[in-house]
Image (cartoon, helix red, strand yellow):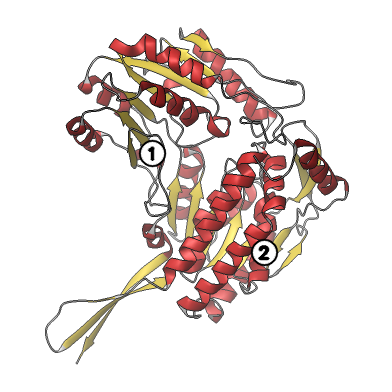
Amino acid sequence: MSDKTYAQWQAYCQALVSQQRIEGRAFINGGYRQAQSGRSFDCINPANGEVIAQIAECDEADVEMAVSAARQSFESGVWRNQSPKVRKETLIKLAALMEANQTELAALETLDMGKPISESFHVDVPGSADVIRWHGEAIDKIYDEVAPTQDDVLATITREPIGVVAAITPWNFPLWLACWKIGPALAAGNSVVLKPSEKSSLTAIFLARLASEAGIPDGVFNVVPGFGHTVGKALGLHMQVDCLAFTGSTRTARTLLEYAGQSNMKRVWLEAGGKNPNIIFADCPDLDKAARSAASGCFYNQGEVCVAGTRLLVERSIHDEFVQKVVEASRYFKPGDPLDPATNMGALVDKQHQGNVLQYIQWGQQGGATLALGGEAALDADKGAFVEPTIFTGVNNQMRIAREEIFGPVMAVIPFDDEQQAIQIANDTDYGLGAALWTGNLSRAHKLAKQLRAGSVWINNYNDGDMTVPFGGFKQSGNGRDKSLHALDKYTELKTTWIQL
C-alpha cells in the first residue's frame, strides 16, 4: 500500500492534470524545448481515455540537435573525463533526487501507462533509483588490465566510453528500463540521447530535469520524445550515434539492425521480447507456491512483461489438478482503477493494444483452445483499456497463442509427458529470453537448465533476481545484457596499448 489513500491519489493526480504541471517537452542540451516543428500529440490516460498532457512530437531536426549536443559534450570531455569517483557521486545524487520525487514519478507512470499506483510507487520508482545508484557505486571499482607479456613490453587493456549512445525504450516499465540503459551508459562516461516510447514519455522527460539538478552537464543526457518512424529512425540512421540500445518488439529490433548497416555500423544492442516457458514437473515440491508464481509470472503488470511466463507447460499426470490451482490463484488479479492502492491489475497501455490482446483471445478460441478463465474486456470497455486475466487449456505449441508474443494477460497451458518433450516444447520458439522449471530433483534441475535455450533460467521460482546478475536473451530475444557489470560491455570499447620498453 502507498502512503496515500485512493482519494488522495485521485486528488493529487487531478491537480497535476488540471494545473498543467505535467511536462511534455523535449529536453536537449540542458533545457526543455518544444519540437522545432511546433507539433505535439495527446498523452492519454489508458484507464479512462482522458487527455492528460501534450507531448512534443519531435522529428529529425530535433534528433539532429540532440545528437549534436551529445557529440559536443562527449568530445569536450566535460563528463567522460571526470574521474569515476565524480561520476559516481553525481549518479548517486540523481538516485536520491528520484527518491525525493517518488510520489510525482509514480503518479506520472500510472497516469501514463495504466499500471497500479502501488507498483509504481513501491516497486518501479525505487527500483529505478536503485539501478542508477548501483551503476554509480560500481563504476569506480572497475579496473583495467595489464597483459602478461615479455619483460621488455608493457601491454595495457583499457576500457573507454563508446561515445554517443541512443537509447530507445518501451512503454511497459518506462522509467525502470530507461534506467537499465542510461545507468551504465552514463556511468561509463558516455553522452546519451533517450527516446522513450510515445505511449509513455512522461517519467523520462521528468527524469531529465532531475539529472540536470544532480549535476550531469548540459548535452550529456537528452530526452527526445516522438514516434519510432521519425525519431527512432533518425537515431538508427544517424552517423554520429555510436551505439544504440533498444528494448521492444522483435520487428522493430530487426529494423534497427538494418539502419545500423545502412549508416555507420553502430553497435546495436537489443532486448526483443519472449514467449517464455514455465515448466511444472509432477515432483514439484510445492504445487500451491508454483501455481501462485505461475499466475503472478503471467499477469503481473497486466501481462505487459517481456519475460512473462505465458506458456505454462504442465506434466500430464498433474495437469488437471495444477491448472485448477492456477485458475484459483489467478482470480487474485482483478482489473481496477490504477489510482486505487488496492488495485493489483491496472489498464493496458492503450485501446489499440487492448484490441490486439482481445484479437489474440478470439484467435485462441477459433483455433480450438479451451477458455478456462477470463477472455473479456473488463470494467468500462468504452473508455478504459482493461482485459481480464485469461487462461487457455487444450493448447498445442503450434497455435498462434503459443507462438506469438501477445504482451497481455493471456496464458497458454500445454501438457507434456516427459523431460524430453518438455524441453522440446520449451525450446520450440523463435525467442529465448527466460524459462523456469519446478522440480524437487536437483539432478534434473541442473541437467535441464543447461538444455533450456534462454538467457535466464529460474529453478523453483519465476523471474527472481537482482542487479548482480545479467538479463538478456538468446535467439530472437536479442543480444547483449542489461543489469550487472556485464551491462558495461555494451557501452564501452576495449583498447590495447602495446609499449616497447
- Three-letter residue code for mark 1: Leu
The foreground one among 440 and 408 is: 440
The foreground one among 369 and 367 is: 369
Residue at the image point whose x is 40% and y is 44% from the top: 478
Residue 308, compared with residue 266, is above or below; it is above
Picture coordinates of residue 480 (x, y %)?
38, 52
Residue at the image point whose x is 83% and y is 45% from the top: 17
Residue at the image point whose x is 43% and y is 70% from the top: 139
In the visual, does 450 lie left or right of 371?
left
Give the residue furthest to the left.
150
Classify mark 1: helix, strand or loop.
Answer: loop
Residue at the image point whose x is 55% and y is 68% from the top: 91
The 10 Å Cα crowd at callout 1, few under 14, some 14 to 19, many 20 or more, is many
In this figure, which residue is indicated by the disc labeled 2?
A: 210
**Where on the picture, by quarter, is residue 272?**
top left
- Three-letter residue code for mark 2: Leu
Classify mark 2: helix, strand or loop.
Answer: helix
Whether residue 400 is visible: no
Picture coordinates of residue 123 (x, y %)?
57, 45
Name the quadrant of the C terminus.
bottom left
Residue 269, compared with residue 408, is above or below; it is below
Picture coordinates of residue 104 (x, y %)?
72, 52
In this figure, which residue is indicated by the disc labeled 1?
A: 433
Contact, mark 1 vs mark 2 (Cβ under 8 Å):
no
Closer to the chain start, of discs 1 and 2, is 2
Residue 116, compared with residue 368, is above or below; it is below
The foreground one among 266 and 462 is: 462
What's the CA distance linking mark 1 and mark 2?
A: 32 Å
The 10 Å Cα crowd at callout 2, few under 14, some 14 to 19, many 20 or more, is some
Picture coordinates of residue 92 (x, y %)?
55, 67
Whether residue 115 is visible: yes
